[in-house]
Amino acid sequence: MERRKFFREALLLSATVAVECTTVGLNTLFKAAASKGLSYYVFVAYSYPLATLALLPLPLIFRNTTTVVPSFKFSILSRIILLSFIGVLSQIFGYTGIACSSPTLSSAISNLTPAFTFTLAVLFRMEKLALRTLSTQAKIIGTMVSISGALVVVLYKGPTIFLGTSPSSTHSTNSLHWLMGSPSVSNWVTGGFLLAAQCFLLSIWSILLSY
């Protein structure tokens, strides 16, 4: 029993790490494609139908016969439409922010998602706020650190560290800058706020999904 629990937790942790690595790789590839002229609207428009075709057979394959499926009512349809709208809008904000800034900023700003989710869960009374408990204090401190770190990353853009010292390295640096883009300070801040808006929409999406 203990071994099964350990393997289950290890599987969940491995899946979480795999999702994060996939997200970072996807953001990096999108930034490279956007630097060559790919529109984020076109990317989002094509990604959702392809994802639907890829994931649609899975519920039919792994369907549990003991699960009671609720009747399809207008309330369920309206919730599906609302969740879809928020999901698409968050993707547009996210990829627009990556196009304005960099995948590195996207990875740093993504730490705002649990902070926003915890704040919204407290506001909607889905999370009990017991200030004397250690878990609540850790969540509050983590939320403050996440928000403070995101503000520092967005509002402060340090000097370039990756510099070429030889003709070959200079050519590689210029190629990397052309591939990944070299955003200005204004675009960096705009991209940061767009990525923060994406995190906020993802938090709303999570709250509505479990509400």
Image (tube, rainbow, N blue to C red):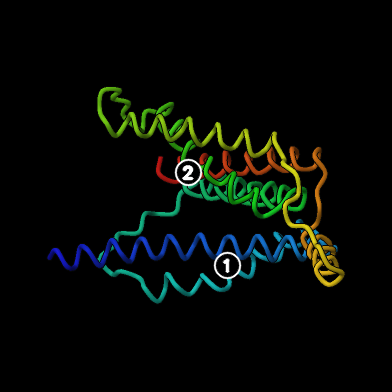
Q: Residues within 10 Å of mark 1 (few under 14, many from 20)?
A: few
* Percent position of residue 110, x then y: 56, 46
Tag of residue 175: none
Residue type at mark 1: give it. Answer: Thr
Q: Quadrant of residue 142?
A: top left
Q: CA separation, marks 2 and 1?
A: 22 Å
Q: Eyeballing the image, is 22 above or below 121?
A: below
Q: Reading the chain from its start, which is encountered first: label 2 or label 1?
A: 1
Circle 1 SS class? helix
Quadrant showing the C terminus? top left
Question: Looking at this rendering, what residue extends furthest in the top direction?
Answer: 131
| In contact (CB < 8 Å): disc 2 and disc 1 | no
124 or 118, which lies in front?
118
- Report the residue at 70% width, 50% height from top: 92
The quadrant in which residue 195 appears is: top right
Measured from the top left, where is residue 54 in percent x and y?
55, 73
Tell me the amino acid under the disc marked 2.
Ser
Q: Residues within 10 Å of mark 2 (few under 14, many from 20)?
A: few
Callout 2: SS: helix
In what quadrant of the picture does the N terminus appear? bottom left
Q: Residue 126: horizontal and vertical position, in percent? A: 36, 33
Number of marks present in the image shown: 2
Q: Which residue is mark 2?
A: 75
Is residue 33 found left or right of 8 in the rendered image? Answer: right
Residue at 66% over, 49% down = 94
Q: Give the label on residue 52, or none.
A: 1
Nearest to the eye among marks 2 and 1: give it.
1
